[in-house]
């Protein structure tokens, strides 16, 4: 079993919720979008349902939560509007760097890697990024638009997974190459059973 409490540094418009990922469940606490295609490796994972209202947060330390046993942190990030437009923040402009259309925050670049998986909701496609290490105890994530973020995208969502999903047999691979360059919810406590 894993227990988490999630909090943000500001007073949110909506509370974050903690539950498990599954078909038909809402993606955001303040939206109607629901999950329609989720890789088996992620089904039943502990899930922190964030809010669309926090999409423009820029803090390097925005969302804090705790896990009580070793786990990988997984982030669902809205796919870029233009395929292959995620570029490393350090790429030179002539290779599609800073002049590129979309960049992820540095905290994501540093601590997460693309898993090769994707998740679909009723209106959006999400890329699945997994932490490079297992976490135990406190986890701190930055804002969706923390530097050097560029482009417009919906707020990320957070999953907590016991196993390394990149080593999973269920891989819905993407047909393009992505690189990583980077809430709302009052404090709360919940627990959910691990699956798989």
Image (cartoon, grey):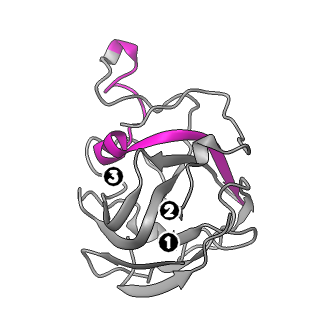
- Indicate the quadrant where residue 181 lies: top left
The mark nearer the N terminus, 2 or 1, is 1
Is 14 on the left-hand or right-hand side of 139? right
Q: Which mark is on residue 20?
A: none
Rounded to the nearest whole Å, what is the CA distance between mark 1 and mark 3? 18 Å
Q: Residue at x 41, y 37 (%)?
A: 180
Establish if 100 lies above or below 57.
above
**Magenta-tinted stretch:** 94-122
Which residue is more in the foreground, 113 or 81?
A: 113
Q: Nearer the viewer, residue 183 or 191?
A: 191
Name the residue located 35 percent from the left edge and 23 percent from the top edge.
97
Quadrant for residue 13, please give it. bottom left
Q: Residues within 10 Å of mark 1 (few under 14, many from 20)?
A: many
Q: Earlier in the sequence, mark 3 or mark 2?
A: 3
Residue depicted at 31% across the width and 27% down the height:
98
Q: Nearer the viewer, residue 158 or 190?
A: 190
Q: Are marks 2 and 1 in contact (CB under 8 Å)?
A: yes
**Foreground tag (3 vs 2):** 2
Q: Give the labeled residue for mark 2.
A: 157
Residue 48: numbered disc: 1
**Secondary structure state at the residue bearing disc 1:** strand
- Rendered view: 78 above or below 20: above
Is residue 196 rendered to the left or right of residue 112?
right
Residue 171 visible in this rendered orientation of the protein? yes
Q: Residues within 10 Å of mark 2 (few under 14, many from 20)?
A: many
Circle 1/circle 3 CB separation < 8 Å: no
Q: Check disc 2 and report its element: helix, strand or loop.
A: strand
The quarter holding residue 170 reads top right
């Amino acid at each position: 079993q894993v227990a988490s409490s999630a909090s943000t540094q500001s007073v949110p418009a909506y509370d974050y919720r903690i539950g498990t990922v599954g078909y038909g469940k809402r993606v955001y606490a303040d939206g109607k979008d629901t999950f329609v295609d989720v890789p088996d490796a992620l089904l039943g994972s502990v899930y922190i349902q964030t809010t669309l209202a926090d999409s423009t947060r820029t803090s390097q330390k925005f969302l804090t939560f705790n896990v009580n046993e070793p786990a990988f942190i997984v982030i669902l990030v809205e796919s870029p509007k233009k395929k292959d437009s995620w570029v490393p923040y350090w790429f030179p402009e002539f290779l599609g760097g800073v002049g590129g259309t979309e960049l992820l925050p540095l905290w994501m670049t540093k601590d997460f890697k693309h898993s090769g998986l994707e998740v679909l909701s009723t209106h959006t496609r999400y890329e699945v990024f997994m932490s490079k290490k297992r976490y135990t105890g406190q986890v701190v994530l930055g804002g969706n638009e923390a530097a050097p973020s560029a482009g417009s995208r919906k707020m990320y969502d957070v999953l907590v997974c016991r196993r390394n999903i990149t080593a999973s047999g269920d891989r819905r691979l993407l047909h393009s190459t992505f690189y990583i360059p980077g809430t709302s919810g009052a404090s709360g406590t919940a627990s959910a059973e691990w699956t798989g």
